[in-house]
Image (cartoon, rainbow, N blue to C red):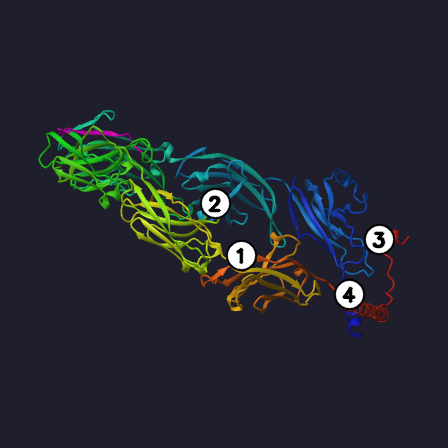
Amino acid sequence: MDKLIPTLLFGVLSLGVCSARVVSVSPGPLIRVQGQPVSIRCDVVDYQGPREQDFEWAMQREGQAPINVISTFDSRFSHVSLSGRVAAGDISVARLEDNAVELRVAEARPSDGGNYSCKTPSTDSIVTGNYEAHILLTVIPDTLKVSAQTAPPVVAEGSDIVLSCNVTRRLMHPTYLSVTWSLRKGSAPLEDVLTLGPQGGVTTGGRYARRYADGGLRLVPGDHGVFRLVVTRATAADEGAYVCTGREWTHEDGGQWRSIVERRGEMGEVAVTPTGQSLNVTASSSSSSSSPTHLSPGGTLSLLCSVSSDNLPSLALGVTWLRDGRHVVAALDRGGVVAPAQNGTTDNGRGGQVALERTGSGQFRLTLWGAGAEDMGAYTCHIRAFIEKAPGGGEEGGGRWYQAAEKTSNPVTVQVSQIKPSFSVTLRQVLAPQATLEPAELACSVTNVSHLPHGGRLGVAWEHTPLPGTGDNRQTSHPIASLDDGGNLLPGPEYSDRLASGLMSLIREQPDTFKLRFLRTQEVDMGQYLCKVFAWSSESQGGVVKTAEHRSAPLTLHWIPKRPSLNVAAKRVREASVGGATFEMSCMVANENLGEASYSVLVQAQESLESSVRTIVTLSPDSVLQHGGATDPNRRDSLVLTKSGPLEFRFRLAGVQLSDRGFYWCDISAWTKQQAGQAWTQATRAESNKVKIDFQENGPSFAVAIQSDASSVLPWETAKMECSLSVSGASPNTDEVAYEVSWFFSRLRDREEQAVRLVGSDRFGVVRREMRNSSSDVTVERRDTSTFLLNVHGTQDSDSGEYYCTATPWYLSASTGSWTQAQELSSSRVFLTVRFAVWDSLKFPLLYGACASLGVGLFSLVLGLVCARCCCRNISHTPRSRNKLMDLEMD
């Protein structure tokens, strides 16, 4: 150790002697443009003396003597030709750090070109290294010109945007040009789209890189400094104000490119017109488009769809002819190929009787041969316009198409002459219900049928409008079900379950008679009913078409609903006169206007008429038994609730205790199901009268007391508290009594609500401890039948507070021979204090601290003496500096 310290000191002194002052400036030579700012940095390192160093700047033009420019410490240092510019701030020096400054020229002049030197006056004890550095500055004229051609103000979506910019300069020194196209959206900052140069390379903005790589952005070469950028297949994202920026660059030593001047040209705002604004679709026929087209059966229908748009050559069109807005007659995809229907229902069965062809640019003709009644309707031409994405312009890459717009033409009405069938419809009530849940039947008859063609068929549809105050209270018509031309049942959404289960049925009794039947009516079934009858005729191609529709007059179905009701009567079957006996109660149910139902039962109790209600046991409508949690889980085997008859339920409680005394009754609810598999619905509920359990038990009397062996203990000692119970009156034998004991703790005096349970022992001797946030431990020790001891091991300060115990006696009743629970007892409180021995806990840390402080002091004294003897030497004489600052300091 004695040899290591002098060695380290010698190494440090050797490093100081070997270091030398180094002055450096920005890498050069520098080329700057007239009128632009110039900044040259100068640094000095490895110097001695004050931390803050001073600097002098001088300049020498070619063939002339050097002149002083500016100094950090002498305001009169500047040459007379530059003093005015220095005073005006055009030439200044800014200190960046203690050892770094920057020479700044606000607006460079041609006369500022020359060789600049940065000097630092010496503050070193030994003159070593360099004290000045040089850099060559060339100031060239500003010849950069930028002329931007105005961009087209409006372009159609999918078209190209051509951006032309002319950037030139007079080449006198080796400088380079770059041109940047930028986009501004609203008040947002400029976003660079693409930059060409300064070395001829191309740089793109962040979201334009992929688009340029895929050819979505193209550079078109030009003559005489003209640069063109083509943005292909423009979208709404390409809208905004375009700006062209030209820059002149110089390549400095060190491999860095520096922009020395730039000019910006505004190219104007460009708006991209969405395809939907200029897209027009017109449907027409050989007759006027405003009047219906009349055809004879078997005639030929010819319709023309005309499409126009500003960017029609850029569009790929998908064409769909629709009848009545939902039936697809024919369709072509964007490639001109017959496409399947994309919405609605395609007409089937026509074979080759329909043709759709493209007759010219934006012209599509629909031809339909052998027109029939099924072809009548309003024909519209639906156009979907697609534009191919610019390469790299979307997440899916180039070559993809996106839908730019879609439009539907005006309708062209087509009528086919025919003779419609005629008939009358009558609705009558066959079976009228008198109350809820009774059956009902309605009949819809068709008479006076004429002009029904051979093979014609009849179909029916039933509708229901609820009465006010029933159902969903909306006076709207709901479809029940219908029979189509083939006799297939088509249920409505609100009646599908009842029709599937058979609670409702719809049948065709005769060719001209239809019936609607209810197996069991509900209140929501009241209201107005009507039936609609359809006539279906066969087509020449083998299909069928609806040719006529007639509806009946509405018929009201109504009855006086009778509300269901329950009456529940409870009676005592077996009375518990002593503790441990069995209590049994029967609950009888009487109902009205209920029909088939199931029942749920809640057996409830309360200690007195003013106390809270407890649920003892429940029985669900599906006869599932559950305990309500109001009794001890160990006594659940003593609770029985059964259905003893169709309308009778029995509750049995075996081995009653004093805690079971009170009032008991049944709360019964009636539940119904409309059909199998559905959820239960509550119809009504009722409570029975109350039956009381009341008996007196002349058992022994108990008392509890607590005592502590000490009211104050030291930390980590064991505190002991004894909880003892005594019996008076008819004292049972030792093996005929047991106790449940629990210990409680509170840190505050006389605050029972803050007490927490520490540990407890049930009457079988099983100990259960609670989770505690303390390092101490608690145990319970049973000394004899009626004495319990609490031990707190390793006491801490957090164990100070009040302690008390509670006990619940259990004894073997002499009258019933069963165990009986007595009332819970609570002892008085004892306060335990855990004293903290201050001196015993601090004496050893204080002793160790004093010894350590003394040792460190002695070691520091010895180390200082060794350094003074061995390491310090007289430094050689410091030569006088010729710098005037050093002279002033020595004077």
**Sequence-wise first label, 1 or 2:** 2
CB under 8 Å between callouts 3 and 2?
no
Q: In the rendered structure, find residue 609 and report the number of the disc placed on it.
A: 2
Please, what secondary structure does the residue beneath circle 4 have? helix
577 left or right of 882? left
- Per the model, the C-alpha gap separating discs 4 and 1 is 49 Å
Quick check: 143 left or right of 838? left
Instruction: Pick whichever of labels 1 and 3 is earlier in the sequence.
Output: 1
Residue indicated by mark 3? 883
Q: Residues within 10 Å of mark 4 (few under 14, many from 20)?
A: few
Residue 609 horizontal/vertical position (percent): 47, 45
Q: The residue under label 4 is which amino acid type?
A: Trp
Question: Mark 1 near mark 3, Cβ–Cβ under 8 Å?
Answer: no
Q: Which residues are magenta?
A: 408-424
Residue shown at 65%/63% (left/top)? Answer: 707
Frontmost residue, 193 versus 461: 461
**Residue 510 % position (x, y):** 11, 37
Q: Contact, CB < 8 Å: mark 2 with mark 4?
A: no
Q: Earlier in the sequence, mark 3 or mark 2?
A: 2
Query: Could you give the CA–CA distance between mark 1 and mark 2, rounded to whole angstroms?
Result: 21 Å
Is residue 399 among what the camera can see? no
Residue identifier under label 1: 823
| Helix, strand or loop under label 2 | loop
Task: State the image coordinates of residue 342 (x, y, percent, origin top left).
Answer: 28, 42
Residue 206 in view in this figure = yes
Quadrant housing the N terminus: bottom right
Total marks in image? 4
Q: Amino acid at mark 2?
A: Leu
Say above or below: 15 vs 562.
below
Disc with the residue nearer the chain's start (4 vs 1): 1
Distance (Cα) linking label 3 and label 4: 69 Å
